[in-house]
Image: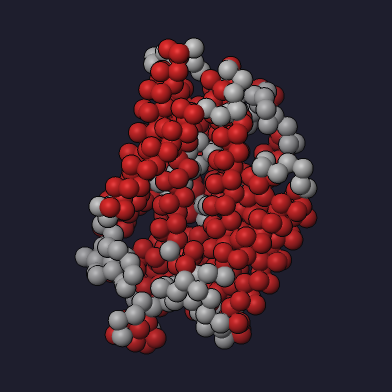
Amino acid sequence: MSQYNIDEEIEEIAGGEFEREPVPQSKLKSWKSFLGMYAGEHAAGTEFVIGPLFLTTGVSAFDLIIGLLLGNLLAVLSWRFLTAEIAVKYRLTLYYQLEKIVGKNLVTVYNLANGILFCFLAGAMITVSATAVGIPFDMEMPKLTDTMPNGITWIIIVLAIGAVISIIAAKGYETVSKAANYMSPIIVLAFLASGIVALRDLDVNSFSDFWNIWGEGSEPFPGQIKYTFWHVAIWSWFANAAMHVGMSDLSVFRFAKKASSGWTTAAGMYVGHYMAWIAAALLYAVYLESPEAQAALAGGNAPNVAPGPLAYNALGIFGAIAVVLAGWTTANPTIYRAGLAFQAIIPKTSTFWVTIIAGSVATLAGLFPAFAMKLLDFVALYGFILAPMGAIIVFEHFYGKKANIILDYAEKMNMKFNSAVFWAWAISFGICYGISVYFDVFLSFMTLPAWLLCGVLFLMMSKKKVATV
């Protein structure tokens, strides 16, 4: 889920230009430029956590394997027919295209939300790296149900990792992004090797043996909810909701020659969000057979979900290093991007210091294992909050003229805050989140309704504004 490959490619081909103008024809890239970016982007630190967490939900073999096939396909279709389609039409960044519709002040609010959520995601990745760094120190690993730091060793390691990552992100992002491109194949190889070793340890000799690892499913671990086919499919569809239906990747595909480049996202979905998740789940399946895990289950407790020891048990020092790299290469550009979001709010502050601020927030978040141990829930919330803003762009593009609204309303009316957009988002968020909480509905199930409702309300409220102009 990191974006180091994409960020580096954009830096290289755009040189930091075209933030407020369409990308010229001379800078457009073929589909091959996006294939490697997406393959590397989605085999990252988060995958080491998400795979095992699926097992803790008691998911069955059919629900996991087929559910992921469908959910990732829906994500690819969203990138292809929504994000890429709009990106090649206007060739603008998300932020500038959004600003033309919603106004600069409302985009600032969006940036704040984006920056904070980026920090929490980076914090989860610092937690991931810490589980590997802590191995030689015999550190107590965080439990699935832990929310607070579990000891001084944990605190020291997280603070040290966070400090290093923050300083590198603030001073040497170009170097980090280049290094990350070299690390990406290593991380993908680690996932593949982990899966192969885990299959050996689980004595899998046929497809039926592989299928029986999950079988008909089981009861979820303490503190987790039971995942069905639709939980897996819808969650995996919206794991990157902010990027596709939320339109964040307009900034990427504006460089594509054709909208068909959107199909390259399949490389990320089926290398990272399919192979890597299942490989990481297999690692956890091996651990669940250990005496330590069995004792925890017998006592009514959830076994640890610590990526470092899981990878170390399968691949030795190479596995531990892969976890450190995966967490680091995800957290570093995420902190950098959070810093840029904050800089839009406090533009007079240097990039160095806003990145340090973002890194400090991320490090503090990393002290609390809940962000990593509840990553399924956090990713669902992340997409639910940000995706509806993408509906504003999608509905204006496909239905704006039919609905007879003023396109790019904020730009044409010279306004900084389009209240129609704000209320469309606030009402859709309030209703759908309220339903999720009050009726105990899985939050990812409400992402699509919130997205659709936000788009419809936007058109209705914008149409009313036309009548008053």
Q: Is residue 119 left or right of residue 306?
A: right
Query: Which of these two is toward me, 467 or 76?
Result: 467
Scheme of image coloration: secondary structure
| Circle count | 0
281 over 296 or under it: above or below: above
Q: Residue at x 36, y 27 (%)?
A: 456
Q: Residue 136, percent across and down?
A: 61, 84
363 over 232 or under it: above or below: below
Q: Residue 432, percent across and down?
A: 33, 43
The furthest residue to the left? 216
Q: Residue 211, percent across and down?
A: 28, 64
Q: Quadrant of residue 464?
A: top left
Q: Is residue 34 visible?
A: no
Q: Residue at x 66, y 62 (%)?
A: 360
Q: Is residue 163 left or right of residue 312?
A: right
88 over 154 or under it: above or below: above
Q: Residue at x 75, y 53 (%)?
A: 353
Query: Which of these two is toward me, 331 or 276?
Result: 331
Q: Is residue 98 visible?
A: yes
229 over 217 or under it: above or below: above
Q: Quadrant of residue 90?
A: top right
Q: Residue 75, percent across and down?
A: 41, 42
Query: Which of these two is toward me, 6 or 197?
Result: 6
Q: Residue at x 34, y 51 (%)?
A: 443
Query: Which of these two is toward me, 94 or 466?
Result: 466
